[in-house]
Image: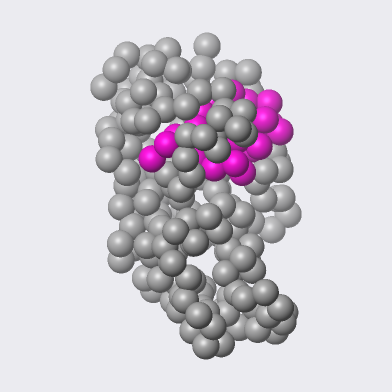
Amino acid sequence: MIDTVIFDMDGTLLDTLEDLADAVNQGLAARKYPARTLDEVRHFVGNGVRKLMTEAVPEGASEEDLEECLAAFKAYYAKHWQDKTVPYEGITELLAALKREGLKTAVISNKYEQAVLRLCKDYFPGSFDSAHGEREGVPRKPAPDGIYAILEELGASKKNAVYVGDSEVDMATAKNAGLVSVGVTWGFRDRQLLEEKGADHIIDRPKELLAIVGKRSL
């Protein structure tokens, strides 16, 4: 029986794309590099901010240039990470339903830890039993280490847990950790990619998760 649901953050719980794109372009502007489109940034997201900026800078950019762009990204994002970010429709109601049903809930993200904790507090106060982002000593997704740490923290078993995310990184994370994967189509990737990456379930609306975990509807 499923008793634990672990979520990705960006593209799954929160639509952070516009704020991330604004920060990417602020970072690129530090070296007068050309801006990236929203759709380009959509496909860069998922492996942490360093990988995001590595993808965004022009080919051939030096390590020094990358570091300058990354620093400008972080400085801007720290002040503007909630300008346009919003929960996806139905997410708040889903989390409330999961809590009413007594399920344990958690977040694991490749976004840096301070941002994950702050966003959970500001948008979903009291909704999660555990939340972690990128932190020293714990390999980023798709490594399963962060999932294992959360399961241990919650006293949960992987056979009774599902992992919910929107990207190829998330599907690989679930597979590597031995969890059932649930792909969501409202995020940064499409249904075809989720199918190609072996999602065990694919949902189009948050409330559909309740049927997968064996709970009543909203």
**The image quarter in which residue 78 lies:** bottom left
**Residue 180 placement (x, y as % from top left):** 59, 23
Q: How is the image coloured?
A: one colour
44 w.r.t. 131: above or below: below
- State the residue at coordinates (66%, 37%): 172
Q: Quadrant of the C terminus?
A: top left
Instruction: Say which of 84 and 136 sits in front.
Output: 84
Q: Is residue 27 highlighted in magenta?
A: no
Residue 151 at least partly seen: no
Which span of residues is magenta-colored?
162-186
Is residue 114 rendered to the left or right of residue 152? left
15 w.r.t. 23: above or below: above
Instruction: Say which of 125 and 214 sits in front.
Output: 214
- State the residue at coordinates (30%, 62%): 84
Q: How many marks?
A: 0
Please identify the residue farthest to the front as the structure is shown. 192
Instruction: Say which of 84 and 187 sits in front.
Output: 187
- State the residue at coordinates (34%, 30%): 205
Residue 195 at least partly seen: yes
47 w.r.t. 23: above or below: above
36 w.r.t. 9: above or below: below
**Residue 6 placement (x, y as % from top left):** 52, 34
- State the residue at coordinates (44%, 59%): 39
Is residue 61 rendered to the left or right of residue 24? right
**Residue 151 placement (x, y as % from top left):** 61, 31
**Residue 101 placement (x, y as % from top left):** 36, 19
**The image quarter in which residue 154 lies:** top right
Is residue 13 rendered to the left or right of residue 24? left
